[in-house]
Image: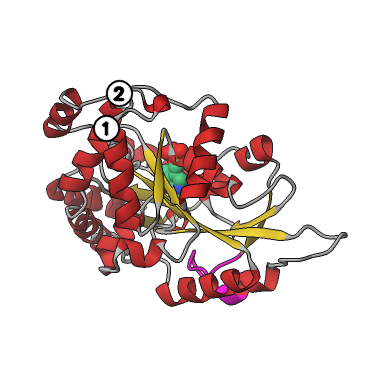
Amino acid sequence: MIDLRSDTITQPTAGMRAAMASAEVGDDVFGDDPTVIELERRVAELLGHEAALFVVSGSLGNLLGVRSLVEPGGELLCDVEAHIVRHELGAHAAVHQVTTRTFSSDGGRVSADRVWALAAPDAGPYAVSTAAVAVENTHGGWGGVVQPHAELVELSRRCRAVGIGLHLDGARLWNAHVATGTPLAETAALFDTATVCLSKGLGAPVGSVLVSSRARIAQARIQRKRLGAGWRQAGILAAAGLYALDHHLDRLAEDHDHARALAALVPGAPTPETNMIMIPTSRPAVDVVADAAAAGVALTANDPHTVRAVTSLAVTADECVRAGQVLADLR
Ligand SMILES: *Cc1c(COP(=O)(O)O)cnc(C)c1O
């Protein structure tokens, strides 16, 4: 099977497994795990923030990051297709009493003006006040699009001027960085809190990292433990993340090349910006997914008339070409 369902399906490579097996570890709840400490130091530095917290999932990173910016009852604004409102099962409301309102966008690209049309930093006693805005980069729900840097700069400027927090869901910030050459810190430093995933295109089996100020990360560490997500010899997992940063970051460019090559073979498929191809279908997307599976290509239906293919280190250039040929015939 050529597996293009997601970049989460990657398996740890032999080199990564060796790094995990030989990792020096300690009790991370005591703050004693040298490999976790090294991963947190490294990611904080890469992203231009003071401190970092290694967590089990991107959803937990988002949950803790947003909570550090929004008090119970406060409002978070995000894109209508954001992972935070579509794929975290209501966690921000169910766990932290955060209310959300969504803004529309031009294919997932954030517009500071459209966010500002909704933002209400001080709404008084009759309406909910906006405490924070979240932006996803790349935007998975919209096919891995890269956020326009100038809009992020403008949004950050406006948020800081009125005290609205800004959170980056950067699960695939790595892909945006590799696609554009914009340094990770140049984007992440526009935000008060940011998350990145190690378990997507970077190929680690588990893990995400939240970055922010020292004070916010100290609070997030407490809240993580409160939620039962403190962990002990987590350095085994942090070692996979460090290995991924050393060996799998630059190679994301190959995934982007493979995605473009696949899309070029499928009439009607837009040219992907990163590692996701959104393919409009003339038949129900679930039928195309079933027929593609029968032909040896695993995909997902993104909506009733769009299928999504995601390239990663789990698929080769030749497999992507083969998948493109299969999909050209199936739409
Ligand atoms: C994958 C992903 C997350 C986190 O997902 P987990 O499965 O909880 O690790 C968050 N945001 C985006 C945009 C993602 O793609």
Residue 261 in the image: state x and y as whole percent.
20, 60
Q: Residue beneath label 2, please?
A: 26
Asked if the beta carbon under badge 2 is closer than 8 A to the nearest atom of ligand 1, the reply is: no
Task: Give the extent of the magenta segment.
Answer: 104-113
**Label 2 crowd (10 A; few <14 / some 14-19 / many >=20):** some
| Corner quadrant of residue 242 | top left
What secondary structure is found at the residue carrying circle 2?
Answer: loop
Q: Is residue 2 left or right of residue 123?
A: left
Q: Please tell me which residue is depicted at 44% across the width and 77% down the height of the picture.
A: 150
139 relative position to 102: left or right: left
- Which residue is found at the position 17% from the left and 28% from the top? 17
Q: Amino acid at mark 1?
A: Pro
Q: For the point 47% across and 42% down, which residue is it?
A: 61
Residue 106 is covered by the magenta coloring? yes
Quarter, ligand 1: top left
Which one is in front, 226 or 313? 226
Whole-angstrom CA distance, mark 1 to mark 2, is 7 Å
| Residue 292, image x, y percentages | 32, 41
**Tag count in the figure?**
2
Quarter in which the N terminus is drawn: top left
How far across and how far down the image is residue 142, in percent? 46, 58
Residue under label 1? 34
Among the two numbered marks 1 and 2 on one chain, the one whose residue lies closer to the N terminus: 2
Q: Main secondary structure of the magenta part?
A: loop
Q: In the drawing, does residue 158 fall left or right of residue 311?
A: right
Which residue is nearer to you in this view: 49 or 243? 49
Does any atom of ligand 1 lie closer than 8 Å to the CB of label 1?
no
Q: Amino acid at mark 2?
A: Gly
Asked where in the image residue 269 lies, by quadrant, the reply is: bottom left
Q: Is residue 269 visible?
A: no
Residue 216 visible in the snapshot = yes
Q: In the rendered view, tell whether residue 325 sits above or below residue 16.
A: below
